[in-house]
Amino acid sequence: MRLATHTSGTGERLALLVHGGTSLHRTWHAVEDRLVRRGYRVTGVDLRGHGDSPRGEYTTEALRQDLIDTLPTAAELVVGHAIGCLALSLALDHLRPARAVYVDPAFRVPPQPEGASDRLRAVLSSADADQVRELHPGWSDEDVRIELAGFAAADPDFHAWVTDHLAGVDNFPKAAEVPSLAVIAGVGSPIGPEGARTLAERGFTVRTVEDAGHNVHRDDLPGLFAALDGWI
């Protein structure tokens, strides 16, 4: 399955961006703009079940194969967020980038309470701008619009699969296959300090953006780029 992609910039260095759940490639818009200004050509994908990409069976192997079928190899940089980090880590042996950045990776989704997938379905179908702003008061109007667009274009079955099959499962990489940076949210990270220590022990560079929530790139863009110093 080939995923929907979007490319901007004309730089010689290639960066690949993979979003997290209930989102779109457009979630990276501010990151993309900064990378283009730094001389990158940037390609973002919509994961299966999101945005303009096809729906289908939801498995970790499918997420991996989608990236292999869609993205070029040997990019200068790959960046993932949340579940997108899991997909990237599984495809890394094929993609072979020079460097990898994992933004608050969901290598272990916390156990979910009963009925969580049904509640998420309701959020995806009914959320409005005021509700998003209440949850994320520091977000720009553009980020609020993109969040709602992501909700509208997300397959609820994808998120039911995350709840039913990924929650509580250890999907941490065994080792950093390429030079790898994990940028951890200071507030509400799915892996928390224990997961950050695990990544450090397995060869990842780990940096924390203390005041950012799980959506680090939208909560604290300057903090994210401070953490990326020396990696981009």
Image (spheres, grey):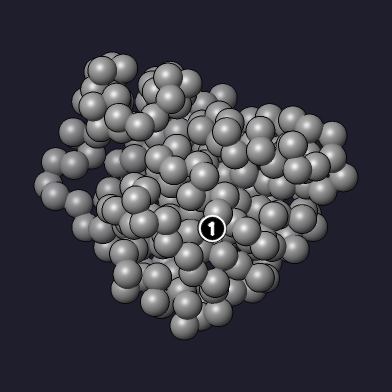
Depth check: give the residue in front, 136 or 61: 136
Q: Quadrant of the N terminus?
A: top right
Q: Is residue 162 visible?
A: no
The quarter of the displayed image where residue 74 is located: bottom right
Q: Is residue 139 left or right of residue 33?
A: left
Q: How many marks?
A: 1
Of all residues, the one furthest to the left in this rendering is 114
Q: Is residue 35 above or below residue 147?
A: below
Image height of 218 relative to 127, above or below? below
**Rendered position, 168 above or below 22:** below
Left or right, residue 50 beside residue 179:
left
Quadrant assignment, res 32: top right
Which percent across, then down, holds residue 158? Answer: 39, 39
The furthest residue to the right: 12
Identified at 48% across, 65% down, the residue is 207
Name the residue carrying label 1.
227
Q: Residue at x 44, y 50 (%)?
A: 82
Give the crowd class for mark 1: few <14, some 14-19, many >=20 residues within 10 Å.
some
| Residue sitting nearer the eye, 132 or 153 | 132
Point out residue 193 in the picture as x, y percentages from the top left corner: 32, 69
Name, please, the residue furthest toward the bottom. Answer: 201
For residue 36, above or below residue 108: above
**Image-quadrant location for residue 175:** bottom right
Q: Secondary structure at mark 1?
A: helix
Pick the quarter of the image with the C terminus.
bottom right
Q: Amino acid at mark 1?
A: Ala
Residue 205 in sight from this viewpoint:
yes
- Residue 126, percent across and down? 25, 18
**Where residue 63 appears, x then y in whole percent?**
54, 49
| Residue drawn where x is 56% and y is 24% of the image | 52
